[in-house]
Image (cartoon, rainbow, N blue to C red):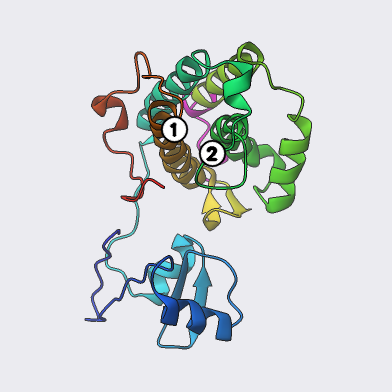
């Protein structure tokens, strides 16, 4: 759980919908079908991690400052996407077709999810959004990439594109505000930061699945230093 600091003394409650039935019933009564969600004074409902709405609504005293963070993001994307590719090359086509434990999809789908979301995030500076329609179109476009080597070739292209973008000094593109399924209306750099955490969480799930379900120890796995500073949920699955 992330902690927020506010200047108005508001008390915050965190509910885990996996175990909190009253919270699920409450959201259902409000017609809310997506999480994460923030409900303020039983009146205002903000769905998703949406800094531009959450900051003023909760009267937060500290705004996220991502200025100068592009170098850090570039280094982290380089590490996480390379680690994803190394893990992929340890897997056979049969391994990749096994169903994972956290959602109704294959291991291949999860890995493509890790690699394709950074592509969608950085391309949002051109395309203007990272919507559910954008995600579906991307998934359809990549559906025939199933071989481990082909997957890593795609992943390496994404890594190069994302890191080059983050190192190009194009502040106008970095600061472009885009509507996104993850984050609401955010700048492209804010979106890339959110998606870095998202992809890293899934990489940790892949490592767990490899060791627990496949009996494969990840070789040259991402290190504690690679993960340092990247916020992911405490609950892995």
Left or right of residue 153, residue 23 in this image: left
Secondary-structure class at tag 1: helix
CA neighbours of label 1 inside 10 A, class few (<14), some (14 to 19), many (20+): some
Q: Position of residue 174 (x, y in %)?
A: 52, 39
Q: Residue at x 68, y 38 (%)?
A: 126
> Do residues under tags 1 and 2 come within 8 Å of each other at their CB atoms?
yes
Which residue bears the numbered disc 1? 209
CA neighbours of label 2 inside 10 A, class few (<14), some (14 to 19), many (20+): some
Relative vertical location of residue 181 with respect to residue 15 in this rendering, above or below:
above
Could you give the CA–CA distance between mark 1 and mark 2, rounded to whole angstroms?
A: 7 Å
In which quadrant of the rendered view does residue 197 lie?
top left
Q: Position of residue 98 (x, y in %)?
A: 59, 31
In which quadrant of the rendered view does residue 13 lie?
bottom left
Q: Residue at x 44, y 88 (%)?
A: 42
Quadrant in which the N terminus appears: bottom left
Q: Position of residue 71 (x, y in %)?
A: 38, 28
Relative vertical location of residue 209 with respect to residue 175 in this rendering, above or below:
above
**Is residue 116 located in the magenta-colored stretch of the structure?**
no
- For residue 100, the mark is 2
Q: Which residues are magenta?
A: 165-175
Left or right of residue 114, residue 59 in this image: left
Secondary-structure class at tag 2: loop
- For residue 233, the mark is none
Q: Position of residue 193 (x, y in %)?
A: 44, 42
Tag 2 or tag 1, which sits nearer the N-term?
2
Near-viewer residue (9 or 65): 9
Relative vertical location of residue 237 with respect to residue 78 in this rendering, above or below:
below
Q: Residue at x 61, y 30 (%)?
A: 112
């Amino acid at each position: 759980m992330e902690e927020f600091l506010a200047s108005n003394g508001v008390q915050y409650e965190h509910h885990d919908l996996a175990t909190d039935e009253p919270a699920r019933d409450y959201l259902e009564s409000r017609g809310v079908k997506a999480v994460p969600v923030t409900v303020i004074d039983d009146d205002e409902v903000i769905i998703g991690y949406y800094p531009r709405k959450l900051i003023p609504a909760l009267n937060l005293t500290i705004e996220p400052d991502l200025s100068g963070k592009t170098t850090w993001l570039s280094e982290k994307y380089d590490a996480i996407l390379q680690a994803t590719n190394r893990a992929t090359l340890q897997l056979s086509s049969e391994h990749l077709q096994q169903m994972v434990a956290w959602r109704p999809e294959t291991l291949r789908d999860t890995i493509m999810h890790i690699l394709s979301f950074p592509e969608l995030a950085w391309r949002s500076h051109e395309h203007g959004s990272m919507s559910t329609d954008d995600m579906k179109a991307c998934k359809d476009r990549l559906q025939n990439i199933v071989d481990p080597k082909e997957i890593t070739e795609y992943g390496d292209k994404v890594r190069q594109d994302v890191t080059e973008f983050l190192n190009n000094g194009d502040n106008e593109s970095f600061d472009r505000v885009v509507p996104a399924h993850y984050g609401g209306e955010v700048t492209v750099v804010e979106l890339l930061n959110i998606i870095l955490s998202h992809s890293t969480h899934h990489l940790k799930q892949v490592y767990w699945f490899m060791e627990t379900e496949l009996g494969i120890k990840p070789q040259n796995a991402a290190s504690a230093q690679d993960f340092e500073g990247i916020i992911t949920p405490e609950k892995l699955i």
